[in-house]
Amino acid sequence: MTVETHSSKYPVITIDGPSGSGKGTVCFKLAKALNYQLLDSGALYRIVGLQAYQAGLLSNVDKAGNPILDEEKLAILTQSLDIQFTANEADNLIEIYVNGERVESKIRTETVGGYASQVAVFPAVREALLDLQQRMANHSGLVADGRDMGTVVFPNADVKVYLTASAEARAKRRVAQLQLAGEKADYEQILAEIVARDERDENRQASPSKPAPDALVLDSSELDAQVVYEKIKSYCEQQGICF
Ligand code: DC
């Protein structure tokens, strides 16, 4: 894939890494502390995954049960979506709208994470989401959360971090989250889903999930969220970001 190199006059901080590494929490806190915009790029792939599922595009499977996806149809679907992120200051959250409908609760499930990872392998889908992501750095500082923020979408970012954790630590966190929400959680099943998703995200041809050569790599397996935040905050300060 050829990608336009993006240069923003506003500061950009990229935090990449697998699901459950704690990126979401740290990105939210950084954006709040700095009064920057927050780009949750995973939400974009989740939206495309859910829309593709609802349009019947994920139901076509080969003899082994693996999905056969039509890249062109997926790209057309992606281009047709009107996606808006709105900061809800009162409730301290980001609202996400697709064609006018609020979607956060629908896209946060493990199942939709799996759909997202399936559609995210296609260069045409990634290309269709690129401009939307890069434009978010045109109006203010940005904290960008994803897999390829520091490698592909914002290669000139001011600060790059790759936040990771063992699959076991991430599965335990997910189980705790689900239990807190009063939902059933099967550790072995969640671990298997995490491992399968990592495998696809890290080994795809198009923009695989990996640290940029100039990223700080941080393993959060043994760290709590506040410590991770403090470490990343002080790294940002070292790189010239003023809080
Ligand atoms: O961060 P998340 O769990 O919401 O992401 C869901 C999926 O979307 C993830 O498994 C891979 C894909 N994704 C991606 O390919 N590139 C990104 N920048 C963000 C997410």
Image (tube, rainbow, N blue to C red):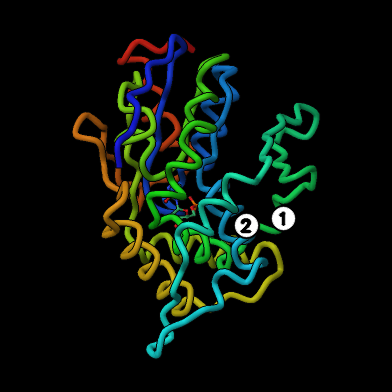
80 vs 237, nearest the viewer:
80
The residue pinned by badge 1 equals 105
Q: Report the residue marked by disc 2.
A: 108
Label 2 CB sits under 8 Å from any ligand 1 atom: no
Please determine whether, in this image, residue 9 is positioned above or below residue 125: above
Q: Residue, x 47% and y 79% (percent of image)?
A: 189
Residue 14 image offset from top left, x and y in percent: 40, 31
- Residue 208: percent from left, percent from top: 30, 50
> Which image quadrant is residue 216 in?
top left
- Dot 1 falls on a residue whose secondary structure is helix
Left or right position of 166 against 36: left
Q: Classify residue 29 by image quadrant.
A: top right
Near mark 1 (Cα within 10 A), the count class, few <14, some 14-19 or many ≥20, is few
Between 62 and 8, the one lying in front of the other is 62
Label pair 1/2, CB-CB below 8 angstroms:
yes
What kind of residue is marked 1?
A: Ser
Amino acid type, mark 2: Arg
Image location (x, y in percent) of residue 174: 52, 62
Rendered view: 113 above or below 145 = below
- Horizontal side of 81 relative to 71 (left or right) equals right
Q: Which residue is rendered at x = 73% and y = 42% of the image?
A: 97
Dot 2 alpha-carbon crowd within 10 angstroms: few under 14, some 14 to 19, many 20 or more: some
Asked if the beta carbon under badge 1 is closer than 8 A to the nearest atom of ligand 1, the reply is: no
* Left or right of 103 in this view: 170: left
Secondary element at tag 2: loop
Label 1 to label 2: alpha-carbon separation: 6 Å
Q: Residue at x 41, y 84 (%)?
A: 62
In the rendered image, residue 13, in percent from the top left (x then y), is placed at 41, 25
